[in-house]
Amino acid sequence: MKRLLAACLLASLALPLSGARADFPAPPILQQGPPPLPANFNGTIRVADASAPEGSHVSAWVNGHRAARDAVKFYEPQGSVYVLNVAGDDQTTPALDGGTSGAEVYFVLELAGGGSVYLTPRAVWVSGAITSLDLSFSPAVVLPLIVINR
């Protein structure tokens, strides 16, 4: 037994000297510190000065990704309201998939029958912030063009 232990010890010392090495995969890069807190946005949603249509959803987009989505709710007397917790970027992945400090957040109203519209105003993502923000969509008014020849 002592000979076997001595042989293993001698072999482990001789491998580095002979230039042989064992290839082990590098450990994964771990996130430094806790994940960022989500940014909370809440308020009313108005479409052409009326409540959002029943069955609609609101989503928040940041850094090109949908970071939150929830159904629009209706309460008296406010009308249609929303609450979104917009996730921060997952720092354990190489992809940018959530909010980062100072990133622009835009909101989309997804209509129950299909289609969607951008809501205004936009916001800024800040970890842990709670922001009351009333959103709206006002359709553009298209006026007919009248040409009078003189």
Image: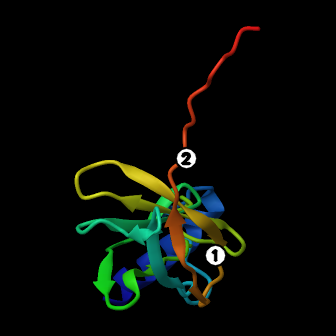
Location of residue 100 by image quarter: bottom right
Q: Of discs 1 and 2, which sits in the foreground?
A: 2
Q: Name the residue under label 2.
A: 140
Percent x, y of residue 48: 46, 62
Secondary structure state at the residue bearing disc 2: loop
Q: In this orientation, which residue lies closer to the viewer: 37 or 23?
A: 37
Q: Where is residue 135 in the image (x, y as percent from the top left)?
A: 52, 72
Task: Return the x and y of residue 17 as percentages of the image width and height.
Answer: 65, 63
Report if residue 93 is visible in the image: no
Say which of 42 and 36 sits in front. Answer: 42
Whichever of labels 1 and 2 marks the residue nearer the N terminus, that label is 1
Of the residues shown, which amino acid type is indicated by label 1? Trp
Q: Which residue is drawn at 51% across and 73% down?
A: 12
Q: Residue at the far front: name it.
A: 150
Using the rendered image of the protein, determine whether residue 29 is visible from the camera's viewpoint: yes
Q: Which residue is drawn at 52% across and 67% down?
A: 136
Q: What element does badge 1 sit on?
A: loop
**Residue drawn where x is 30% and y is 65% of the image:** 53
- Name the mark on residue 125: 1
Which amino acid type is shown beneath numbered disc 2? Answer: Ala
Query: Does 141 sit above or below residue 76?
Result: above
